[in-house]
Amino acid sequence: MEQYPYFPMFIDISKKKIVVIGAGKIARRRIETLTKFASSITVVSPDLNDSVAALEQSGIIAVRRKKYEKSDIEGADIVLAATNDNAVNDAVWADCKALGITVNVCSDVNKDDFFFPGVAVKGGLVIGVTASGSDHSLARRASERVREIIDEF
C-alpha cells in the first residue's frame, strides 16, 4: 500500500489545553512555537532550561516541576511527549491513547497523531513545513529558508 504524506491542516488552538511533557531542547523549541498560537500551555518537568523558565516567569506558560503522572494530562486537548526518556514518552503515548487525547511523541514517529511542523510566521501569514516524519533535518532547513523568504515581504 502506498504511503501518503500527511495533509497540512491549520486549526485554531488558541483556547485548547496543551500539555508538554519535558523541558529540554526539543520541548523548548516546540513550547516557543506554541506560544504564538495557544494561551493555555502547561509544561511538566522536574527541571527547566533557562528559556522555559523565562516563559514561566513572564506568565506565558504554567509549569509543574515534577515527574510525569497520568493525572498531568487529564483534560488536555493536545499533549506533546518531548522528554529524553523513551519510557516516559511511551507512557505518555499510552495514557493519551487511553484517554482519547491527541498526542505527538518526539522520539517515535509511529506514535504521532500529528507531526509538529517547522513554522514560519509573519503577521497573519503562517507557513508549516514537514517532511512527513522522515527527515527532520530537511524540514528544519526548509523552515529556516521559508522564514528568510517571508522576512522579505
Image: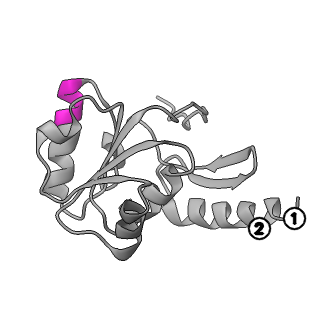
Image point 46% across, 63% down: which residue?
Answer: 29
Q: Position of residue 144 (x, y in %)?
A: 66, 66
The residue positioned farthest toward the bottom in the image shown: 50
Q: Which mark is residue 54?
A: none
Density class for disc 2 (Cα within 10 Å; few <14, some 14-19, many ≥20) is few
Q: CA distance from mark 2 to mark 1?
A: 7 Å
Q: Is residue 140 left or right of residue 96?
A: right
What residue is shown with label 1? 152
**How many numbered marks appear?**
2
**Residue 84 seen from this side:** yes
Q: Secondary structure at mark 1?
A: loop
Query: Three-letter amino acid code at disc 2?
Result: Glu
> In the visual, does 24 lie left or right of 40?
left
Q: What is the chief secondary structure element of the magenta stretch? A: helix
In the picture shown, does residue 129 fall above or below 146? above
Q: Is residue 117 left or right of residue 104?
A: right
Which element type, helix, strand or loop, lies under badge 2?
A: helix
For residue 68, above or below residue 114: below
Mark 1 burial class by Cα count in 10 Å: few <14, some 14-19, many 20+: few
Residue at 49% in and 59% down: 32
Pick the front one: 5 or 25: 25
Quadrant in which residue 147 is drawn: bottom right
Check if mark 2's residue and mark 1's residue have beta carbons within 8 Å: yes
Near-viewer residue (136 or 2):
136
Magenta run includes residue 41? no
Rendered image coloring scheme: one colour
Q: Disc 2 marks which residue?
A: 148
- Looking at the image, the residue that sits furthest to the right is 153
Q: Which residues are magenta?
A: 95-99
Residue type, label 1 = Glu
